[in-house]
Amino acid sequence: MYRTHNCNSLRKTDIGKEATLAGWVHVSRDHGGVIFIDLRDREGITQVVFRPEENAQLAKEAHGLRSEDVIQVSGKVAARVPGTENSKLATGDIELIPNQLRILNRADDLPFPIDAEIHNEDLRLTYRYYDLRRPELSRNMRIRHRVAKATRDYLDSQGYLEIETPILSKSTPEGARDFLVPSRLVPGKFYALPQAPQQYKQLLQVAGVEKYFQIAKCFRDEDLRADRQPEFTQIDIEASFVTPDDIFALTEEMLAAIFKAARNIDIKTPFDRLTYREAGQIEELTETAKVFGAKGLAFIKVENGEWKSPIVKFFSEAEKTALKSKLKIEEGDLILFGADKWDIACEVLGRIRLRVAEIQDLLSTSVKGQSDFDVWDFLWVTDFPLLFWSAEENKWNAMHHPFTRPKAEDLSLLDDKKKFPEIRAEAYDVVLNGVEIGGGSLRIHEPQLQEKMFEALGISAQDRQSMFGHLLRALRLGAPPHGGIALGLDRLVMLICGAETIRDVMAFPKNNRGMDLMTQSPADVDPRQLRDLSIKLAGEKKKQD
Ligand code: ASP
């Protein structure tokens, strides 16, 4: 047996008892020959004291211990010398006086100190297994575990089945690039890693599962930003015979269970709701600007990596780059411009700043003196537009994905291209403190409507069959009305932990170039594997020619 207790369990009531502990040397101090070791395991810290007058040989051995050596100590629990108790430590009243020390493993020179704030994230990521020993990260891992467990427990209590869907799968359009995996057995063909289990979860509704969920790994090959990773985790949910209200209630109760389990926080339900149009505040802000003397207000809205704005076409690349770095422009930002005489521009932008603070509820937050993490402000945004025009691709795209259903009242507008911008979808996002944490929709379950939607998106009849034939066939075999939602687990845990990036709540994240610095991946592959594949790819090409 390696240990009788963990490093956070011995208390005053244990004084006089024998105990064996195992863990890492957190800190060691030599006070005139007496060696004090803070012994750490994942539960906490216990002070271990080697006094030469009690055991000279052992004190000598302890003298050679270095930070992060792994040791086992057995001995007697004793009261600390009066006046040296540490009230900040749960074990601060006692210490262990060992009669045995076993060095289980030594640690080399350390890449960085574990108890200091390290700003070189690349270094931290290179030694991630070491970085994860830091109490803050180990706490984040625990919270993440509790969030996942609360999710499973809650959804299980509601009759939802956890079902795994394939990782080697076929492209599903969620607005990003796919990661592709070449097939060795079917030369020239590729699997796509799932951007989301969207089609599979809908097919499970056709299969009669009725209530599905999965804590699902998703893969999107996008440019990385502060809170994006090429692989991430979703709480993915789909159900049959549901209305948006059913999904809202389920999500609200699930989030309440998660917050309770993770941080013992009671969140307020039901959440407020806003339609997408109500949430579009640019028009209102423009009106405010006019009241204070401006002729208008120019804006840039950053959405899906694109700068959406009527004025951006007048900027050179250099100007755009300068703006981006000066204003630290990121996804989701709204940049408002005023141009006029100095005093008018200042007055107008000052007023706009106040109005934005009011809309975002920043004023009341500072007045109440609360920190961001005490405020849990949830919101549903509903009735998103079904389609948006992509000037780049010169075509209509689905705002959410092509399986989202239009609102019944707007169905007829699908017959008239001019009316496309007005079509609203049964789509919703859930937002926490201004950050989108999830989104979903009711789906199209009628094959004819799905065909019509594909047509509106400019997908040819042939492509419809090759890309979505399986779905269209399934919809023809008695697909029930269904809908669902997916929540970004990493982002949710990040907000719950008060972490600054999602990397701090993932065990082995990639850096902002999509690299795992610890394993040095992506890496070259075995040249023989590559040769096998490329011979087959070349052979396939020849056949096609
Ligand atoms: N598949 C969607 C997404 O990943 C979520 C959903 O519609 O349920 O955003």
Image (cartoon, rainbow, N blue to C red):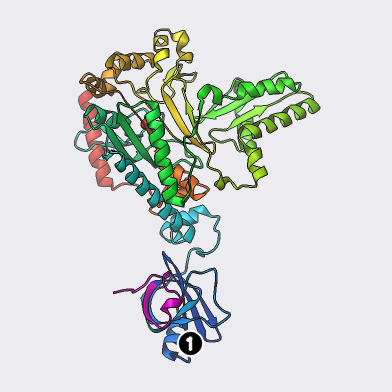
Q: Quarter-wise, where is residue 127 in the image?
A: bottom left
Q: Quadrant of the C terminus?
A: top left
10 Å neighbourhood of mark 1: few (<14), some, or many (≥20)?
A: many
Task: Point out the quarter of the image occupied by ligand 1.
Answer: top left
Q: Quadrant of the N terminus?
A: bottom left
Question: Number of marks in the image?
Answer: 1
Q: Tell me the SS state at disc 1.
A: loop
Whole-percent x and y of residue 181? 29, 37
- Under mark 1, the amino acid is Arg
Does the magenta-highlighted stretch encompass residue 19?
yes
Q: Nearer the viewer, residue 244 or 432?
A: 244
For the residue pair 535 and 482, the one nearer the viewer reads as 482
- What's the residue at 24%, 36% (across, down)? 183
Magenta-drawn segment: 1-22
Residue 353, image x and y in percent? 69, 32
- Residue 112 placement (x, y as % from top left): 51, 63
User: Is residue 412 in view?
Assistant: yes
Residue 182, picture quadrant: top left
Q: Which residue is mark 1?
A: 51
